[in-house]
Amino acid sequence: MSREGLEARLRQIGAERYHDKHPFHHLLHSGGCTADQVRAWVINRWAYQAAIPMKDAAFMSRCTDPAMRREWRSRIEDHDGGVAEGGGIRRWLKLAEAVGLDPDYVASGRGVLPATQFAVDAYIRYVRDMPLLQAVASSLTELFAPKIHEKRIEGLLEHYDFANPDSLSYFRKRLTEAPKDVAFGLEWVLTHADTPEKEDMAAEALIFKTNVLWAQLDALHSAYVGPGRIPPGAWQPGEGLA
């Protein structure tokens, strides 16, 4: 398969499997979520956001190429930020505060759904343990992220009182960060997936990552939309409010 053919294959996976198609996102972006459903989303998405620099650090620990480490470490800086000025994680806590949650409660990780935590932990282990090609390819959901961020910003601003440039700063920042990250990752995968077997490995890694994202929304929808079965230990409406 040519480089163009492999890229088309990867993009088709996103067209079919990316979580912008999940019913929960349609509900959220159209203004159909209650305040508590939005809070449940913020709490559970925190687990994923907090894990991103951890999985990137695990990835870098395996890289013997200093040039690749230099390229990759900006991902950690984007999320962790500096000492005085936090990155994406701190911006996510601004969103938590805007929807009425105590940022310390959200940052503690209490109340996260079991299935969300399982999915996040599986992603960290995947990046830590699988061949580098698959670890990099799993990050390529960023190909599709700007589109969902744009739609999210538009929908939240239109339908929810908490939405403003400050509370949505995480998503606005990712509009410029994600394309930068994915440009390097995509080029690396297209260069190194140079056999049919490696092309399959890259595709399977991207499918795995879309499953990680989809599973989190399935758990969220089941617990807080329908049938509304909140598992033991997960966030209950009224807890962790500011």
Image (cartoon, rainbow, N blue to C red):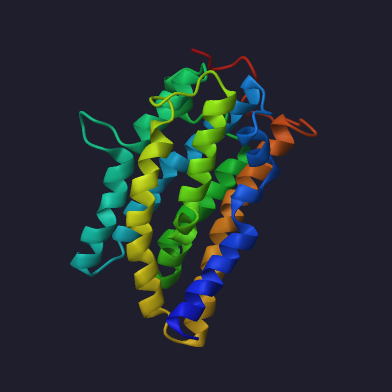
| Residue 234 placement (x, y as % from top left) | 63, 29
As drawn, 215 above or below 1? above
Q: Is residue 46 left or right of residue 30?
A: left
Q: Is residue 183 left or right of residue 200?
A: left
| Residue 124 placement (x, y as % from top left) | 45, 53
Residue 58 visible in the shown view = no
| Residue 193 placement (x, y as % from top left) | 43, 79
Q: Is residue 181 left or right of residue 104?
A: left
- In the image shown, does 62 or 222 lie closer to the viewer? 222
- Image quarter for residue 203? bottom right
Residue 225 visible in the shown view = yes
As drawn, 222 above or below 233? below
- In the image shown, does 140 or 209 lie closer to the viewer? 140
Q: Residue furthest right?
A: 227
Number of dots carrying numbers: 0
Picture residue at 68% right of the left edge, 35% below the top? 27
| Residue 143 placement (x, y as % from top left) | 46, 58
Picture residue at 60% right of the left edge, 48% below the top? 20
Picture residue at 64% right of the left edge, 27% below the top? 37
As drawn, 52 above or below 110? below
As drawn, 34 above or below 183? above
- In the image shown, does 63 or 227 lie closer to the viewer? 227
Q: Is residue 142 left or right of residue 58?
A: right
